[in-house]
Image (spheres, helix red, strand yellow):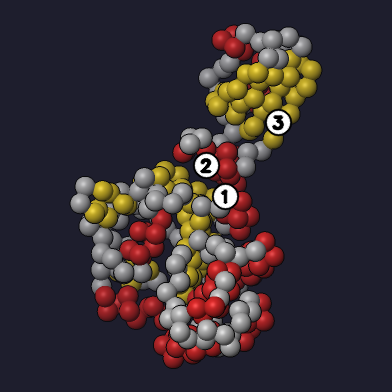
Amino acid sequence: MTKRYGETVANDDVSFAVETGEIFGYLGPNGAGKTTTIRLLLGLIKPTSGTAEVLGADIRDRRALTEVKADIGYLPDTLGFDDRLTGNEALDHFARMRGDERREELLELFHPPLEKPIETYSSGNRRMLGIVQAFMHDPDLVIMDEPTSGLDPLKQDRLHKFLEEERDAGTTVFFSSHVLSEVQRVCDRVGIIRDGELVALEDIESLLERSGKQVWVHLAEPVDEAEFLTDQMIDVEVVDNSVQFTYTGDYNALLEHLVRYDVQNLDIANPQLDDVFKHYYGEG
C-alpha cells in the first residue's frame, strides 16, 4: 500500500502479511507511518495506490470491509469516547453494535470506574475502558495502536499476559508501538517502519540473531583501531584499552582474531531490540 498526502509519502509501498493467531509488532517512532497503516487497514482512509485484505475483505470494498468489522476489535491511540457518558454507557453503546459476550470477563482484569463519567477518567482508566471495548465482542482480529499508553507497570504486565493468552486461543493481534521492550516481550514477529517505508520484517528471534552479537573486549594495551577492526564489526566504540562493537560474522573467526591480542576480559551478549532499532534509525 502507498498513501500520499501531497508531496508527503506517509506509507511507501508497505507490504506484509500477518498470520492467524500471532502477535505482530509494528514498530517505529511517532511520525513513522504506523497510524497511517492502521487507518488504511480499517478503511478509515483510502490508499493512493495498492490495497490490502483484512479477514478476506479488500479494504477498497466498503461493503465487504463493513461485513467483517464485527470480527475486528480496535484500540486507537487516541480514544474517542463521548466524555459525557459513564464507562458503562459507553460499553453499552458498543455492545449494541457488536455484542459484549466477554464484557464481564474483561472487567475482572481491567476495571475502570464504570459508574463515573469518562471525562473524569485518568489516561490509564481510559485505556482500560478501551481495551475492554476492543475485546468484549470476542473478535478474531484486534488492531491496537500504542496499547499500553497511560497504563502503570502492573496494568502493562496484565495486558501483556492477556495478549499472550489471546494469541494462544487463536486471536490475531496487530500491535503498533514505539516501546521496544514490550514488542520484544510479547510479539512473535515484527515489522520496522521508517519514514513510511518498511525496512525490516521477520520473527523476533531471527531479527536479533541476524543483527549480530554485542561484544565488549578489554585489552592489556591500547589498541590500534585500524589494525584491530574487521569488516564484520559495526557500531564500534574504542575507549583506551576497551573496544565495544556489534559482530555480524562467524564467532570462531572472532575468537581466532582475538587470540592475537592480550585479552583481559571479554563479554559477548545477544542484542536487545533497541540495539536493532538503533541500527535502522541511528542514535538520533
Which residue corresponds to mark 2? 277
Residue 73 rendering spot, x and y as whole percentages:
47, 75
Tell me whether circle 3 and circle 1 mark residues in contact (CB < 8 Å).
no
Judged from the image, the secondary structure of the residue bearing numbered disc 2 is helix
Mark closer to the observer (3, 1)? 1
Q: Quadrant of the N terminus?
A: bottom left
Q: Is residue 129 above or below residue 60?
A: below
The picture quadrant where one finds residue 66 is bottom left
Judged from the image, the secondary structure of the residue bearing numbered disc 3 is strand
Q: Is residue 79 above or below residue 268?
A: below
Measuring 40% from the left and 49% from the top, which residue is drawn there? 32
- Graded by Cα atoms within 10 Å as few (under 14), some (14 to 19) or many (20 or more), the crowding at tag 1 reads some
Tell me whether circle 1 and circle 2 mark residues in contact (CB < 8 Å).
yes
Distance from Cα at disc 1 to Cα at disc 2: 8 Å
Residue 228 rendering spot, x and y as whole percentages:
62, 12
Which residue corresponds to mark 3? 268
Q: Amino acid at mark 2?
A: Phe
Which residue corresponds to mark 1? 180
